[in-house]
């Protein structure tokens, strides 16, 4: 093996091996001829030994538990390594020897009598650095033999990889202790084995981190109350592109098996890429030269979804090897997963605020003086998902000398979700509600609707088809003994396919009907009286020609309701929507930095300078057919007659949301159909009396599409200082990062020319010729930081960190186009528009923490944080009118003298427009506490942590004028119990997140969205059959917890979702 096999810049640690090596390879004398200038203050043994190793350029071996809690003497002046070690370790209970191969080996002065095998078994869970194997090989190559005891029995050494739950926790604990800032991490339990099956679900075990789930699987993270867009996500220190329309990174796109560790930096430094007010998350992948030699890891398992009652496959593998005396390495990993899921849900798109509920119909004619909130819709829905994830990494490393290392690495991930849903939809129009009851908050709790109402049977598709790529080249050069220069360049690309406008699809068959909506003290509201007709009431739907009349009875006017809601003969065509957003995100980065390090332990220890350039281009292309074709058959016309065999009865089953309060009143049967079959049929039919051919339902590229380009130029300087305060060691880091950002927005707008009537509920926004838009903006930022780590006593660490950070505006919030989202009769007009002049959020951050470490795994910590955020970006809603191309104001044709056509008496259409803008300030503060403990040698251990977070701006649900509140703020807690001893490992993990405000807007309503508190229990375990074979099992959400959301008040129902438990079992092979 080459010289690179022994790492000089970091100590190699392995419990017990230090004792063996000291006995076997101690030279007869130390190198007396060379003296070094040392300046090492009294400090922790691990730090002092590392300092003497770096200054003398000698490799180092010691055991963590040997040096734990040991404080060394100071060492100042010229000494040989032997004399320096003697003085440094005098009276500490440690001794040091130097092998013939120039390795410092540190052991206890009186080592316990135990075999090498016993000692190695006690070593916990860290993969040996490649230098250990190289070192052993070098020794064997020189013919050296190790003698054990007086009988001269030969001891055999081999590369040992130690793994497990406790080792993962120990690695994370050590990284936390050694960090200069506030940082938590997660380490893989073994090569290719992450603690959880999903990266986000692992991250939620860290204090201050909460997650949002999709399909029962972790997707986005919130850190210290700051949501996905406030957290910068890096892979190996580089920004990775995102397929989301915003800046948020979806953690479900990368397979956990491809990851070796994750760091969550909660305090910032000048060297970290900006953008994360919440945190900077660095995902790390394995490197072949860190592994050294040949390794193979593979696992296969079957995944069982309880709701779907399906078993699907999952497999992953990693192979790594080094060549040419350890100077060249190759690593290849791959992962495949397929899931078949079923999501049972009841959902509302939102609640309408003060949208024309007749006062004469409220509370028996008494009316209501306050705000009135009425439901937009209620859907019973079952979604069947097919999730397929394919990923891999390839790493090539070349280190021809100790001073040069070149790494070329690539990552690929394909994650496709194909979701098909069937639902029973009930849509309400507030002005047509009768016999309305509202509670003290103004929320409708009981209401009838006899006309202007429809029963819809939906066939929906929601596909998420994504690809993510990253390739990077890194060169690290030790220009001198003190100067290291690093140059890194990378390219990342992520895209989400619109699937030719079919990624989002909704086909409706239905009919005019009546309904009663009721919300009581149960968790779930319910609908009734739509299943059969009432001959004494009339729907207002006139048959034969599909026209709408508001009075009855008249010839041909049908009674309200139908004789049997499951009879396909009632079905008529309605809305047929195709659409989807196509997202293309590209990130290019170049990062150069230089680090000066003389090996000092006091005074100036290191200095770093760097330059950074990044260019991100995100293009969002909208595909849809909602400019008219989608509503060619709106209103349930008699022509064409839908064949009865197009529809069948769907039975959601007795388990549909079973156990949820109010579930006994749910509708469990409805009609379903194949939307593509229906569209093919409709496209082949003439329409209306004229017999004009139907316009194609295919989606087209809309001119509301846009692209945002963002360039960032940055430079930084950072220094690290060391010294003593009251005789105890401290480290101080201070730096500043300067950045200049240029933003360019390109897009088009489609101005509205007029509104026209589509059916009894919908209006169409007709648009004119597209107009090109280009807008630019720029801003500069100066981001200082300082962090202190001080050890006032052995194993006690105090931290202080202060910094300024920023988060740039969400890219899709910069879109300048005016995008109409709702045009419904009754004054329900909404639109959204971006703001290309948005400036970034800025935050002044303060962290204080106290941590106590004991044993090789245990610690307790308490931290406080505060973030003063200025220039907060909020979505502001305002009522606006629209000026048409002709210069007049846009009017509502469903008003005036003729409700079925435009006329001069029509009212002006007033849109509720949502736009982002800067200006608000907020303070977020919190407390984080953690406790990690292993119960001696029993194998049992626990991890407990909790986060309490609060802000200075609360949300008042009764105040409709409030435009700003802090979303994502919630308390959270984790409890993990584990057993890890011998061949058996078991872990049970409980995670809880308190109720929080998720959004200030709803999908299709005027209010906000709250997520109720949620707790989940997961379990995993494994058993080692042989040294190379281990069987394992996993259980996710084993108590079948459900997700619930509501609007301004608890009884404004938004969502109840059941994703069900899932279980897995498999086998893992390593060699």
Image: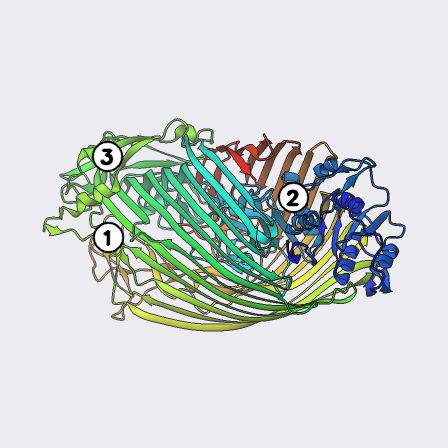
The residue carrying mark 1 is 698
Q: Where, by quadrant of the figure, is residue 1054 drawn?
A: top left
The residue carrying mark 2 is 159
165 displayed left or right of 574 = right
Colouring mode (rainbow / by chain / secondary structure / one colour): rainbow
Q: Is residue 921 above or below residue 864?
A: below
Q: Nearer the viewer, residue 767 or 674?
A: 674
630 displayed left or right of 733 = left
Q: Position of residue 286 (x, y in %)?
A: 56, 51
**Quadrant including the C terminus:** top right
Q: Is residue 695 above or below residue 1056?
A: below
The secondary structure type at the circle numbered 1 is: loop
Q: Crowding near pointer 3: few (<14 within 10 Å), some, many (20+)?
A: many
Q: Point out which mark residue 103 bears.
A: none
Q: Position of residue 422 (x, y in %)?
A: 32, 38
Q: Nearer the viewer, residue 545 or 780?
A: 780
CA gap, disc 1 to disc 3?
A: 23 Å
The residue carrying mark 3 is 647
The secondary structure type at the circle numbered 2 is: loop
């Amino acid at each position: 093996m080459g010289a690179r096999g022994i790492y000089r810049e970091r100590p190699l640690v392995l419990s017990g091996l230090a004792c063996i090596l000291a006995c076997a390879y101690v030279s007869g004398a130390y190198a007396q001829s060379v003296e070094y200038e040392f300046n090492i203050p009294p400090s922790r043994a691990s730090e002092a030994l590392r300092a003497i190793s770096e200054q003398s350029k000698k490799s180092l071996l010691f055991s963590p538990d040997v040096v734990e809690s040991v404080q060394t003497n100071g060492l100042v002046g010229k000494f040989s390594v032997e004399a320096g070690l003697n003085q440094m370790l005098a009276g500490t209970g440690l001794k040091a020897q130097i092998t013939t191969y120039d390795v410092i080996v540190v052991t206890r002065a009186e080592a316990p009598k135990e075999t090498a095998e016993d000692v190695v078994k006690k070593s916990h869970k860290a993969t040996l650095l490649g230098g250990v194997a190289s070192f052993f090989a070098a020794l064997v190559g020189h013919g050296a033999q190790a003698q054990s005891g007086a009988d001269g029995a030969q001891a055999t050494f081999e590369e040992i990889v130690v793994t497990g739950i406790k080792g993962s926790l120990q690695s994370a604990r050590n990284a936390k202790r050694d960090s200069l800032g506030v940082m938590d991490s997660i380490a893989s339990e073994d090569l290719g084995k992450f603690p959880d099956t999903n990266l986000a679900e692992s991250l939620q075990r860290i204090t201050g981190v909460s997650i949002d789930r999709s399909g029962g699987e972790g997707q986005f993270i919130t850190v210290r109350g700051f949501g996905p867009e406030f957290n910068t996500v890096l892979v190996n220190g580089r920004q990775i592109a995102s397929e989301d329309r915003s800046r948020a990174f979806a953690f479900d796109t990368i397979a956990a098996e491809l990851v070796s560790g994750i760091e969550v930096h909660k305090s910032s430094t000048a060297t970290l890429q900006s953008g994360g007010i919440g945190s900077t998350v660095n995902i790390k992948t394995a490197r072949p030269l860190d592994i050294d030699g040949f390794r193979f890891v593979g696992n296969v398992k079957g995944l069982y979804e309880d709701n779907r009652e399906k078993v699907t496959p999952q497999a992953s593998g990693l192979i790594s090897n080094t060549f040419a005396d350890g100077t060249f390495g190759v690593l290849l990993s791959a992962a495949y997963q397929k899931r078949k899921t079923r999501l049972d849900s009841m959902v509302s798109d939102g609640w309408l605020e003060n949208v024309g509920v007749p006062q004469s119909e409220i509370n028996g004619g008494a009316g209501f003086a306050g705000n009135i909130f009425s439901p937009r819709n209620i859907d019973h829905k079952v979604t069947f998902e097919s999730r397929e994830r394919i990923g891999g990494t390839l790493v090539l490393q070349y280190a021809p000398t100790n001073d040069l290392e070149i790494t070329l690495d690539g990552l690929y991930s394909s994650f496709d979700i194909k979701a098909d849903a069937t639902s029973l939809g009930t849509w309400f129009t507030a002005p047509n509600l009768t016999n309305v009851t509202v509670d003290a908050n103004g929320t409708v709790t009981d209401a009838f609707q006899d006309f202007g109402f429809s029963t819809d049977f939906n066939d929906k598709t929601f596909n998420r088809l994504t690809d993510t790529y990253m390739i990077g080249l890194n060169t690290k050069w030790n220009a001198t003994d003190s100067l290291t220069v690093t140059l890194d360049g990378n390219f990342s690309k992520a895209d989400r396919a619109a699937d030719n406008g079919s990624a989002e699809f909704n086909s409706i068959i239905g009919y005019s009907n009546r309904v009663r909506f009721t919300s009581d003290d149960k968790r779930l509201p319910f609908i009734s009286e739509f299943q059969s007709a009432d001959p004494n009431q009339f729907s207002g739907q006139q048959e034969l020609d599909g026209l709408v009349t508001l009075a009855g009875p008249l010839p041909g006017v049908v009674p309200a309701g139908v004789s049997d809601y499951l009879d396909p003969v009632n079905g008529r065509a309605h809305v047929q929507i195709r659409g989807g957003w196509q997202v293309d995100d590209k990130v290019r980065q170049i990062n150069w930095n230089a680090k000066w390090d003389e090996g000092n332990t006091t005074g100036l220890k290191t200095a770093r300078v760097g330059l950074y350039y990044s260019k991100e281009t995100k293009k969002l292309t909208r595909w849809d057919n909602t400019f008219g074709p989608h509503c060619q058959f709106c209103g349930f016309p008699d022509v064409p007659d839908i064949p009865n065999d197009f529809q069948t009865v769907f039975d959601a089953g007795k388990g549909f949301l079973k156990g949820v309060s109010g579930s006994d009143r749910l509708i469990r049967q409805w009609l379903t159909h194949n939307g593509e079959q229906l569209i093919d049929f409709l496209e082949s039919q003439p329409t209306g009396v004229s017999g004009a051919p139907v316009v194609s339902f295919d989606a087209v590229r809309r001119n509301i599409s846009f692209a945002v380009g963002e360039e960032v130029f940055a430079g930084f300087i950072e220094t690290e200082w060391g010294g003593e305060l009251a005789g105890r060691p401290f480290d101080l880091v201070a730096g500043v990062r300067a950045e200049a950002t240029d933003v360019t927005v390109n897009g088009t707008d489609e101005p509205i020319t007029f509104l026209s009537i589509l059916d009894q509920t919908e209006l169409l926004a007709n648009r004119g010729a597209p107009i090109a838009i280009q807008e630019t903006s720029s801003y500069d930022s100066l981001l200082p930081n300082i962090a202190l780590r001080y050890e006032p006593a052995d194993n006690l660490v105090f931290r202080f960190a202060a910094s300024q950070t920023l988060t740039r505006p969400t890219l899709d919030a910069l879109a300048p186009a005016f995008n109409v989202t709702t045009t419904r009769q009754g004054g329900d007009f909404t639109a959204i528009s971006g703001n290309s002049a948005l400036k970034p959020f800025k935050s002044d951050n303060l962290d204080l923490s106290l941590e106590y470490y004991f044993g090789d795994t245990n610690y307790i910590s308490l931290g406080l944080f505060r973030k003063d955020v200025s220039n907060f970006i909020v979505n502001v809603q305002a009522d606006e009118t629209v000026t048409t191309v002709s210069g007049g104001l846009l009017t509502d044709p469903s008003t005036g003298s003729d409700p079925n056509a435009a006329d001069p008496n029509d009212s002006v259409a007033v849109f509720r427009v949502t736009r982002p803008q800067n200006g608000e300030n907020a303070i977020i503060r919190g407390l984080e506490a953690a406790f990690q403990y292993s119960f001696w040698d029993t194998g049992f251990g626990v991890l407990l942590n909790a986060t309490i977070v609060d802000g200075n701006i609360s949300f008042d649900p009764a105040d409709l004028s409030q435009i700003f509140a802090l979303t994502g703020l919630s308390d959270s807690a984790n409890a993990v119990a584990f057993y890890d001893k011998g061949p058996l490992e078991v872990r049970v993990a409980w995670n809880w997140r308190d109720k929080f405000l998720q959004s200030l807007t709803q999908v299709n309503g005027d209010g906000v969205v709250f997520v109720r508190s949620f707790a989940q229990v997961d379990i995993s375990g494994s058993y080692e059959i042989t040294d190379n074979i281990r069987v394992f099992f996993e259980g996710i959400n084993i108590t079948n917890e459900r997700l619930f959301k509501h609007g301004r008040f608890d009884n404004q129902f938004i969502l109840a979702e059941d994703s069900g438990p899932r279980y897995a079992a498999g086998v893992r092979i390593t060699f």
